[in-house]
């Protein structure tokens, strides 16, 4: 009995030690996460809070702090969901109501936001931040009397709080009372003359009233107080332009581009200014940047066409006009312009065709104006033009008639990050190309990543790495690293060593696989493919050989499709990596484009190899992942989504699968599913997800 009691006490003591240790670890992780949050390292903070949530999902706090991180990354829906999860676990965390109210406000759930703010005010009566937000929510609800009551209470309680007067100004602007709005801005500045936004907002109100001198003075003061807000330089440049100070406007746009080289509004406006002063070549350079970053900016194409015409690059101008006319086929001026360019190049037939098409469009438009509906549509368009400022257009206004108007800065331009790190601060403001996360490959190396969560794992690799044939460890990665010179030398030496081994053991499947890996490292795809085929020949159940063969075929396919430079090379030396049978399928039908035909066969081979790998190892999620990417590249999104579903079943923490599945859902108009997946990808460390979420949810 005594012996049993001692064993029980020891077990109890040991269990308590484990509990205490787990508690200390959880507290430590929470502390580090909150430190990361404080220093605005939001991506890293989320990773820490994820760990706590995974360990102790019943705790409320980590959901609240993760909501804060998501909020600052502008994953507003995700932040709202985390606040709700927090309050489900502990309904007495008042700050969670306040934050959820803010998220609901931004999601335009104004009634829900009002309810949260009202609840929070019961616990924190007189809280000025809650009163400000409640006032704004009631303005959005058009409940102007209630809003005024909120703001009056705020001003009475905090008579020197400038945000109260600015909120009242917003209310008066909604009520179309600009006189009182000016008075409110004056009061805001009187109580706090060092708050830059008061000047910038009053300045833009002066600008709307065409009082350019006062508008300039206010924007100038705002920039002095906060020189890091790029939108203020853009707006001051606009005001200078209206004051005919082209040199000053140019200087402001230069400053914005110095701060943010990819500011498309500043680039576009500076290009227009350069064109006005005859600096055509540098104007073209700016439009080049705009088009590179925003390939559907038809205004930029049209302006660049005009500039190319000015420098006698008529063919280049026609190429740009071709892009514009494909998007605006009912714009007669564009066809007249292209007709003139074709005439200058001696293409009389093409010129006459464009000229007649443009004239026919004008006749159709004249007939439309003769109808009642046509006149009403024309009058409506004219009224809309009257509302626009004389020399500007909104960034969202894509009317091609306004191709030569300056662009007004969007609200987002005024909230740009002052951080230079790719994953610190407001990463959602970065311009990112919307594309799938890369495929996984087997390699010896991997580029470092600030948000990498863990080493990608598969038992198949463990089995390989335990074999003495391999002199170094293989790993799975989708972030390959280029080789250093010393590494290249090493891999060539290893090719020689494995060749000797194969000579002595010609039926050794693993030796062929090892040499195939070495060829893959040095980018010798043809020999690499041959060795993986040999591996399969001697061991037709070698999963990773099928996987690698698919990867190699895909790599060379991507290389071949990357441009004409590779086509010249491929005609001299046809790579056997592109044909599993060794035959030349391009000869199958001379009437079919051999490149297109070859691509189709290659895609079929790639999918076939991944499918074989899956049949041999159904739990190898990376084969599903890569196969999904191939299907997505062929626009077979439902099949790709099905494969990503399998990946996520096998590994619910694989961020890349959520990200790619999200893009596939967006491609088939399943927006909410897509955004949910992108939010999850952001939680798991893919920074670009937040930029896409912001782009998809911004109005």
Image (tube, rainbow, N blue to C red):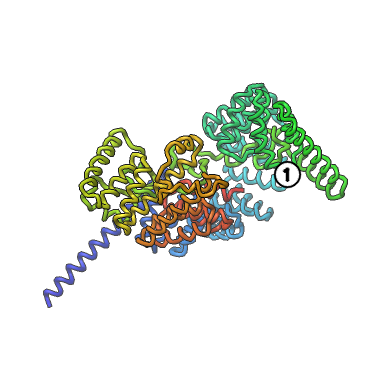
Residue 181, position as x, y percentages in the image: 68, 41
Q: Residue at x 59, y 53 (%)?
A: 134
Which image quarter: residue 9? bottom left
Residue 397, position as x, y percentages in the image: 68, 41
**Res 486 visible:** yes
Note whether 84 is above or below 167 in the view shown: below
Q: Between 61 and 336, which is closer to the camera in this rendering?
A: 336
* Residue identified by numbered label 1: 177
Which image quarter: residue 607? bottom left
Residue 694, position as x, y percentages in the image: 54, 48
- SS type, badge 1: loop
Which image quarter: residue 363? top right
**Res 240 visible:** no
Q: Residue furthest bottom?
A: 1
Q: Is residue 181 left or right of residue 523?
A: right
Q: Between 647 and 73, which is closer to the camera in this rendering?
A: 647
């Amino acid at each position: 009995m005594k012996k049993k009691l001692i064993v029980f006490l020891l077990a109890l003591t040991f269990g308590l030690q484990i509990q205490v240790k787990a508690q200390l670890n959880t507290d430590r992780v929470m502390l580090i996460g909150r430190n990361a949050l404080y220093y605005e390292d939001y991506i890293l903070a989320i990773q820490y809070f994820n760990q706590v949530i995974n360990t102790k999902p019943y705790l409320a706090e980590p959901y609240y702090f993760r909501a804060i991180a998501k909020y600052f990354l502008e994953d507003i829906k995700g932040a709202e969901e985390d606040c709700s999860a927090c309050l489900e676990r502990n309904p007495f965390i008042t700050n969670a109501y306040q934050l959820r109210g803010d998220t609901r406000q931004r999601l335009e759930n104004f009634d829900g936001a009002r309810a949260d703010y009202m609840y929070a005010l019961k616990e924190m009566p007189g809280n000025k931040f809650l009163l400000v937000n409640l006032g704004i929510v009631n303005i959005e609800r058009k409940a102007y009397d209630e809003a005024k009551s909120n703001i009056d209470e705020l001003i009475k309680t905090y008579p020197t709080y400038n945000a109260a007067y600015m909120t009242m100004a917003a209310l008066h602007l909604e009520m179309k009372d600009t006189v009182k709005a000016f008075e409110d801005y004056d009061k805001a500045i009187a109580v706090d003359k060092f708050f830059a936004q008061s000047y910038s907002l009053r300045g833009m109100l002066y600008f709307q009233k065409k009082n350019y001198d006062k508008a300039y003075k206010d924007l100038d003061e705002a920039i002095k107080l906060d020189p890091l807000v790029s939108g203020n330089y853009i707006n001051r440049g606009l005001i200078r332009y209206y004051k005919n100070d082209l040199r000053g406007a140019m200087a402001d746009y230069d400053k914005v581009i110095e701060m943010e080289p990819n500011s498309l509004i500043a680039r576009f406006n500076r290009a227009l200014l350069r064109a006005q002063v005859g600096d055509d070549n540098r104007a073209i350079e700016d439009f080049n940047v705009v088009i590179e970053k925003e390939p559907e900016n038809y205004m930029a194409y049209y302006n660049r066409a005009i500039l190319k015409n000015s420098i006698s690059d008529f063919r280049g101008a026609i190429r740009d006009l071709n892009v514009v006319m494909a998007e605006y086929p009912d714009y007669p001026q564009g066809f007249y312009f292209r007709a003139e360019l074709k005439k200058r190049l001696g293409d009389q037939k093409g010129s006459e065709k464009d000229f007649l098409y443009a004239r026919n469009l004008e006749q159709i438009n004249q007939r439309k104006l003769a109808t009642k509906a046509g006149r009403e549509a024309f009058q409506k368009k004219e009224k809309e033009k009257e509302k626009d400022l004389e020399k500007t257009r909104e960034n969202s206004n894509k009317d091609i008639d306004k191709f030569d108007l300056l662009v007004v800065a969007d609200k987002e331009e005024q909230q740009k990050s002052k951080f230079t790190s790719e994953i610190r601060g407001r990463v959602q403001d970065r311009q990112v190309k919307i594309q799938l996360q890369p495929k996984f490959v087997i390699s010896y190396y991997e580029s470092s990543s600030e948000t990498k969560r863990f080493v990608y794992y598969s038992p198949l690799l463990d089995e390989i790495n335990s074999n003495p044939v391999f002199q170094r460890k293989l790993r799975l990665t989708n972030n390959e690293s280029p080789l250093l010179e010393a590494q290249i030398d090493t891999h060539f030496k290893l090719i020689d060593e494995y060749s000797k081994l194969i000579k002595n053991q010609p039926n050794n499947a693993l030796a062929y696989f090892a040499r195939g890996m070495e060829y893959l490292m040095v980018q010798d795809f043809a020999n690499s493919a041959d060795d993986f085929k040999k591996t399969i020949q001697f061991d037709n159940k070698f999963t990773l050989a099928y996987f690698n063969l698919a990867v190699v075929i895909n790599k060379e396919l991507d290389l071949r499709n990357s441009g004409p430079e590779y086509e010249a090379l491929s005609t001299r030396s046809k790579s056997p990596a592109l044909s599993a049978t060794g035959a030349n399928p391009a000869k199958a039908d001379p009437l079919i484009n051999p490149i297109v035909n070859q691509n189709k066969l290659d895609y079929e081979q790639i999918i076939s190899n991944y499918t074989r790998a899956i049949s041999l190892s159904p739990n190898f999620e990376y084969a599903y992942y890569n196969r999904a990417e191939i299907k997505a590249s062929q626009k077979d999104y439902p099949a790709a989504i099905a494969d990503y579903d399998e990946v996520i079943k096998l590994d619910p923490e694989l961020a890349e699968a959520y990200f790619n599945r999200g893009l596939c859902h967006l491609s088939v108009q399943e927006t909410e599913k897509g955004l949910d997946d992108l939010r999850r990808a952001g939680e798991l460390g893919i920074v670009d997800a937040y930029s896409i979420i912001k782009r998809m949810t911004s109005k």
